[in-house]
Amino acid sequence: MAKVLTYEDGIAAVYGGAILGGGGGGLLEEGLKLVEEIFVAGEPELVDLTELDGEDLVACVAMVGAPSAADQYISNEQLCWSYRNMNTHTNHRLKGIITNENGAITTINGWLQSVLLKVPVVDAPCNGRAHPTGIMGSLNLHEQQDYQSVQFYAGGKDDFAVQGFVEGPLQNTAKTARQASILAGGLVGVTRNPVTIDYLQKHGAPNAITMAIELGYRFLNGQTFDDKLTHILQQLNGVHIVTGKVQHYSLTKENGFDVGKLSVGDYDLTFWNEYMTLSKEGQLQSKFPDLIMTFDTEKMLPVPSASINEGMHVAVIHVDQSQLKLSSTMQNQELLKEIDVVIKAVL
């Protein structure tokens, strides 16, 4: 039976999603703004995989682009356009919506469509943490022989507005959607790659939306920052690495990604939207898909890589990947090699 989500669930999902975003997954303030819009429109529904048949189809909705892009814009009509057209493409066989990952915005991707289109959100995102490339949120479909990806995308305002459809090999369609996000001013809403529930069970991250909501409640229930940090580290079995001022912060936009690095105390972090590496005095301590996350200690908030400022006082945590709900793509060595190339360029 589908669960009717509350406004409080939405707030918790944004905070928990922001933590599981690992530096990416959208901006906290934008996620909170979206919660307000969602619950003015109505109440979304969340359904467990076990409530659906194995051969039922679901499609992924995602926001593709750079979180810090200044000209990003997506309307409700554009979001619904991409889903409706995908449903038509599948001969109206879609039974639910899944999101691509956990993040401040991405955890609640699809909640607005759930209200507007009266379609349930399925509690099995393509990944239980945020990741930089579209193909990492594509459930290893690129390894299915002769698989053809289908993506509908729309976004942008006035002269930046774009919408379209692309079909082909997953690498090509993912790059096309990414390029469309650049043309749209930084972001497009995408509905893509319908899969069966049986396939999603094997390659997605079942119950990762529930995990984000529970984590958000744990964080919000803390009275002090130390309480908040202790609560989430207990739930995730994580470690507090360092607290201090941000130094040597740099951020550049490259092909629709936020790329950069920073230092806190003796530790250095790199990011490619999400935090990629954590090093101490030149020695690698942790690497994606382990979760590395920063918190603004003064505001007592999770803060993504694109919102860091030089001199900000932050706490850095680490959570081993074994403690997360991850897609099969997070063990795909072909995809992880692409990250190694970017890391070498940033270091």
Image (cartoon, grey):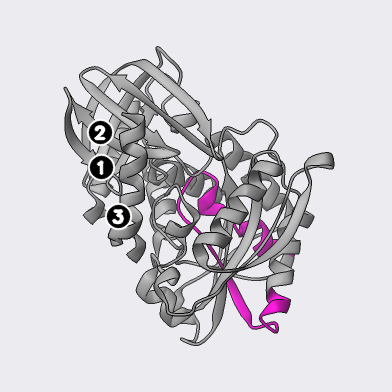
- Residue projecting furthest to the right: 158
Front one among 234 and 67:
67
Residues in magenta, as a range:
87-116
Q: Please say if the residues under marks 2 and 1 sit with CB atoms less than 8 Å apart.
A: yes
Q: Viewed as shown, does residue 41 lie left or right of 98?
A: right
Residue under pointer 1: 287
Q: Amino acid at mark 1?
A: Lys
Residue ID at (21%, 40%)? 286
**Mark on residue 278?**
2
Secondary structure, mark 3, is loop
Query: What is the x, y in percent for residue 216?
Result: 42, 45
**Mark on residue 252?**
none
Query: What is the x, y in percent for residue 173?
Result: 58, 61
Residue ID at (36%, 44%)? 218
Q: Amino acid at mark 3?
A: Leu
Q: Amino acid at mark 2?
A: Leu
Specify whether residue 325 is in view. no
Secondary structure, mark 1, is strand
User: Badge 1 local density, few (<14 within 10 Å), some, or many (20+)?
Assistant: many
- Of badges 1 and 3, the one in the foreground is 1
Residue 287 lies, with reference to residue 123, above or below; the image says above
Residue 191 lies, with reference to residue 310, above or below; the image says below
Going from N to C along the chain, the mark reached first, 1 or 3, is 1
**Mark on residue 324?**
3
- Of badges 3 and 2, the one in the foreground is 2
User: Badge 3 local density, few (<14 within 10 Å), some, or many (20+)?
Assistant: many
Q: Based on the displayed image, in which of its 4 quarters is residue 243 positioned?
A: top left
Query: What is the x, y in percent for residue 260?
Result: 41, 28
Residue ID at (51%, 45%)? 14
Q: CA distance from mark 2 to mark 1?
A: 6 Å
Indicate whether residue 68 is drawn in magenta: no
Q: Viewed as shown, does residue 4 lie left or right of 235?
A: right
